[in-house]
């Protein structure tokens, strides 16, 4: 796969449509919302299936527990809102009522990361992957684009147990195709290479592809992996990349503290240690600005991924 | 009015004493746990498990069972005792409470203990969970009902009121909430820690049907449940005036026994008192 030109599309639109299609196929699917349903596009499910849709107001802890109760009675309950409210604001409710209970609650959150933009740091959730992957029994998904977001909806409904899935408010490049196979727990090698591996999630996967193109111009063959499941981590694919390419750069629209970089580093440290560079938010809060401006200011760019690749290759060469 | 026989009342009273004895023994054996709030809720739990709830101990996950949700999860000794006495698991297992490898965790775990319907421990989530259950029953046109017990200290938790609003929004008349109004929370009297009164008016303002009863009087408990069943279009809150530590004189109304087990000497005294009560029924 090469980089672009890509269509820019809304993950929320794919999410909303996938939910309706799922609702049509499966009468057991219910949706709860918290006064963000228009923005996150679950309102359309509500219009199609009014008696399977519950608007619970600005009361996210209640929303999550209600979803758990619905699931305990046999429903597949989708709870959707902005990621700051659907993770941090409700953390212990998710922990006790969703994960400890191992219920069929599927938390789908938009507005993850810096690209929320002008709303600023209060709304830019850069710590949700860290929070959610720390909870036992939780599955954590980060779809790269619209079509993959739709696949996450279907896969989440088919899987037993709790799921947290986060995606962006901003339109993102569509890099996958509806025909690509997708499975929870599997990292997908979307470009082969033997010199270094770039592993990204969410909108950073496209930037990994751009970085791979520019590395190629310098004669470096980069493997690119789309890590759409953060937990459970596909350690087989990651270990193979570590063994075969000898260096890894991770890229996430999330803090590097306990994000995918940390998850990958600890996995390969246990199996096949190689140098790692982490591109992501460096343990700081964001600020107001446009999505692209923020990605640039906070170093979430293809250039930084390229720098990371040179860095790991240099460190690898130095040996001990 | 509900027709309640003397015989039924006597049976329930005896059962409640049995549950209280279990609570004392379990928490003594564990040398931890929360006897006070377990004892205050014992009569409500007895009325539910031994007269009201349609549950099947042989098939704990029977889809059409009534649901009992203990929001104040620290009071699980009373729940475990009722489940064991009702036949969900052997009574002998009660003494494994809070021990390593036990099915009877320090706070309720869903899926581990037969008959347990929710996970609780962090206060304030159970009523919301009950709302989800009640919505599902309604959606599926099922007659089963949801009964939730909350603590009065638990009224401090914001989520309780989020759930109260959602319940009345959806007119959940298949949901009944018992508020165990024992007047004590962990560190003191509710009115000192965070004043709740006027509590009935609060629930009324949230559009609930509200009853205030003596939570140790089986006639009043059963009548309240009957009235909740008859009430259409609104959930019912039963503010149940209770005594924390009820049944053992030196534990009654004592803040200490919220989260303290009895000593060996106290155990003997407590059991003797409860046995005397049993004999007097
Ligand atoms: C969210 C939360 N904060 C703190 C605690 C610690 N805690 C356990 S029980 C309790 C007091 C409970 O009082 P109440 O609800 O009145 O229970 P009861 O008197 O019926 O035992 C507290 C503060 C908790 N379990 N959950
Ligand atoms: Mg109390």
Image (tube, rainbow, N blue to C red):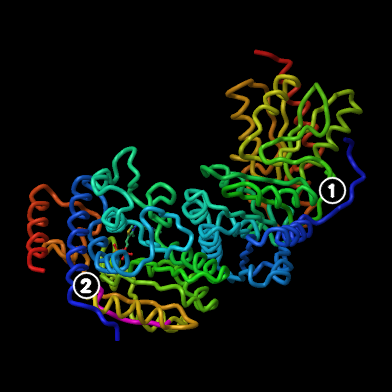
Q: Is residue A1 magenta?
A: no
The number of numbered badges drawn on the structure is: 2
Please, what is the dominant secondary structure of the magenta stretch?
A: strand
- The image shows residue A203 at horizontal and vertical percentages of 77, 46
Q: Which chain carries label 2?
A: B
Q: List the single residue furthest toward the bottom.
A: B1
- The image shows residue A25 at horizontal and vertical percentages of 72, 58
Q: Mark 1 lies on which chain?
A: A
Left or right for A42, reference B37: right
Name the residue beneath numbered marker 2.
Answer: B8
Q: How crowded is mark 2: few (under 14 residues within 10 Å), some or many (20 or more)?
A: some
**Quadrant of residue A306 within the rendered picture:** top right
Towards the viewer: B205 or A273:
B205
**Quadrant of residue A281 within the rendered picture:** top right
Up-down: is A19 above or below B194? Answer: above
Q: Is mark 1 on a helix, strand or loop?
A: loop
Report the magenta residues as a range. Answer: B209-216
Towards the viewer: B61 or A110:
B61
- The image shows residue A249 at horizontal and vertical percentages of 73, 31
Rendered-image quadrant of the C terminus of chain B: bottom left
Checking the image for residue A58, the label placed there is none
Q: Is mark 2 on a helix, strand or loop?
A: helix
- Separation of disc 2 and disc 1 at Cα? 68 Å
Rendered residue at 76%/35% (across/down):
A188
Name the residue beneath numbered marker 1.
Answer: A174
Rendered residue at 89%/47% (across/down):
A6
Up-down: is A14 above or below A195? Answer: below
Q: Quadrant of ligand 2?
A: bottom left
Rendered residue at 29%/83% (across/down):
B2
């Amino acid at each position: 796969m090469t980089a672009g030109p890509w269509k820019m599309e809304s993950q929320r639109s794919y999410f909303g449509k996938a939910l309706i299609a799922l609702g049509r196929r499966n009468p057991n699917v219910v949706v709860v919302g918290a006064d963000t349903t228009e923005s996150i596009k679950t309102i359309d499910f509500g219009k199609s299936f009014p008696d399977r849709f519950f608007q619970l107001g600005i009361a996210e802890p209640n929303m999550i527990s209600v979803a758990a109760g619905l699931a305990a009675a046999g429903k597949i309950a989708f709870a959707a809102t902005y990621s700051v409210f659907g993770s941090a604001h409700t953390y212990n409710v998710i922990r006790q009522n969703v994960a400890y209970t191992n219920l069929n609650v599927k938390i789908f959150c938009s507005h993850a990361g810096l690209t929320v933009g002008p709303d600023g740091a209060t709304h830019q959730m850069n710590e949700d992957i860290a929070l959610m992957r720390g909870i036992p029994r939780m599955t954590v998904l980060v779809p790269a684009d619209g079509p993959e977001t739709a696949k996450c909806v279907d896969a989440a409904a088919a899987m037993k147990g709790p799921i947290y899935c986060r995606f962006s408010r901003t339109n993102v490049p569509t890099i996958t195709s509806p025909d690509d196979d997708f499975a929870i727990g599997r990292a997908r090698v979307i470009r082969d290479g033997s010199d270094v591996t770039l592993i990204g999630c969410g909108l950073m996967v496209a930037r990994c592809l751009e970085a791979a193109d520019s590395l190629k111009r310098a004669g470096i063959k980069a493997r690119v992996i789309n890590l759409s499941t953060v937990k459970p981590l596909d350690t087989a694919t990651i270990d193979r990349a570590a063994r075969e390419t000898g260096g890894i750069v991770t890229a996430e629209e999330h803090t590097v503290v306990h994000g995918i970089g940390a998850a990958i580093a600890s996995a390969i440290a246990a199996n096949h240690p190689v140098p790692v560079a982490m591109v992501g938010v460096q343990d700081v809060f964001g600020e107001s600005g446009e999505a692209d401006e923020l990605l640039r200011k906070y170093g979430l760019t293809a250039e930084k991924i390229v720098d990371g690749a040179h860095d790991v290759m240099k460190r690898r060469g130095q040996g001990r | 009015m509900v027709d309640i026989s003397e015989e039924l009342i006597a049976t329930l009273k005896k059962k409640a004493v049995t549950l209280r004895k279990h609570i004392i023994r379990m928490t003594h054996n564990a040398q931890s746990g929360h006897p006070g709030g377990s004892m205050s809720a014992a009569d409500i739990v007895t009325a539910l498990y031994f007269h009201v709830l349609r549950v099947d101990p042989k098939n704990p996950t029977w889809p059409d069972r009534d649901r009992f949700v203990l929001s104040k999860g620290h009071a699980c000794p009373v729940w475990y005792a009722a489940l064991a006495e009702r036949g969900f698991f052997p009574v002998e297992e009660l003494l494994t409470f809070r021990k390593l490898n036990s099915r009877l965790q320090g706070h309720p775990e869903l899926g581990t203990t037969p008959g347990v319907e929710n996970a609780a421990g962090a206060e304030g989530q159970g009523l919301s969970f009950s709302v989800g259950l009640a919505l599902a029953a309604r959606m599926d046109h099922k007659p089963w009902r949801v009964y939730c017990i909350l603590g009065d200290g638990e009224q401090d938790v914001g989520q309780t009121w989020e759930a109260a609003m959602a319940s009345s929004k959806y007119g959940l008349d298949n949901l009944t909430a018992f508020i165990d109004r024992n007047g004590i929370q962990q560190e003191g009297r509710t009115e000192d820690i965070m004043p709740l009164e006027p509590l009935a008016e609060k629930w009324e303002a949230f559009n609930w049907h509200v009853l205030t009863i003596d939570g140790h009087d089986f006639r009043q408990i059963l009548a309240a449940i009957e009235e909740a069943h008859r009430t259409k279009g609104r959930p019912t809150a039963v503010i149940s005036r209770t005594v924390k530590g009820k049944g053992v004189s030196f534990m009654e109304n004592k803040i200490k026994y919220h989260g303290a087990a009895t000593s060996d000497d106290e155990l003997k005294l407590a059991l003797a008192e409860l046995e005397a009560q049993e004999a007097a029924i």
